[in-house]
Amino acid sequence: QVQLVETGGGLVQAGGSLTLSCVASGRTFSWSAMGWFRQAPGKEREFVASISWNGGSTYYADSVKGRFTISRTKAKNTVYLQINSLKPEDTAVYYCAAGSTWYSPGEGDFGSWGQGTQVTVSS
């Protein structure tokens, strides 16, 4: 029902910053949360951050706490991931997803996924 498109990826040096965007369209009323996942080369997809549909609550993986910030616009159709102090291990394809819960979610809590955007961090 919902279509998700991620943008904002690119090549940056370690210590730099990026902001990823995810635009949602279609029938989004049934979703209560948005999230970001990432998949590094040779690794399984892992959870990064999530936010409630109204933007009032957030949850982060331990590996990104203090460096990543998830937010969304007042219009509620765009979700952002601000990434600071980038590390080479942050290199991955980042995916936006729409799901049913924002608190400590897993992949099974998200039913719609974007195509992903590549983030590459050089050392």
Image (tube, rainbow, N blue to C red):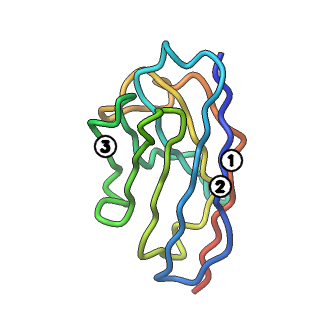
Q: Amino acid at mark 1?
A: Gly
> How far apart are labels 1 and 3 at the CA level?
20 Å
Asked whether, in this view, residue 19 is left or right of residue 11, the answer is: left
Sequence-first disc among 2 and 3: 3
* Callout 1 touching callout 3 (CB < 8 Å): no
Separation of marks 2 and 3 at Cα, in angstroms: 20 Å
Q: Answer with mark 1 or mark 3, whichever residue precedes in sequence.
A: 3
Q: Residue at x 53, y 28 (%)?
A: 98
Mark 3 element type: strand
Relative to 60, say whether 91 is above or below: below
Q: Tag on residue 55?
A: none
- The quarter holding residue 95 reads top right
User: Which image quarter holds the C terminus?
Assistant: bottom right
> Which of marks 1 and 2 precedes in the sequence?
2
Q: Amino acid at mark 3?
A: Tyr
Does the CB distance between marks 2 and 1 fall below 8 Å?
A: yes
User: Which quadrant, please, contains the N terminus?
Assistant: top right
Residue name at image x 41 percent, y 37 percent: 74
Q: Which mark is residue 59?
A: 3
Q: Which residue is mark 2?
A: 93
What amino acid does circle 2 point to? Val
Query: Is the residue 101 above or below the residue 10 in the image?
Result: above
Percent position of residue 66, x then y: 29, 64
- Residue found at x 56% / y 56%: 20
Residue sitting at x 57%, y 45%: 45
Check if mark 2's residue and mark 3's residue have beta carbons within 8 Å. no
At numbered mark 1, what does the secondary structure look like: helix, strand or loop?
loop
Residue that mark 1 sits on: 116
Q: Measure the C-alpha gap from mark 2 to mark 1.
A: 6 Å
Residues packed near mark 1 inside 10 Å, few (<14), some (14 to 19) or many (20 plus):
many
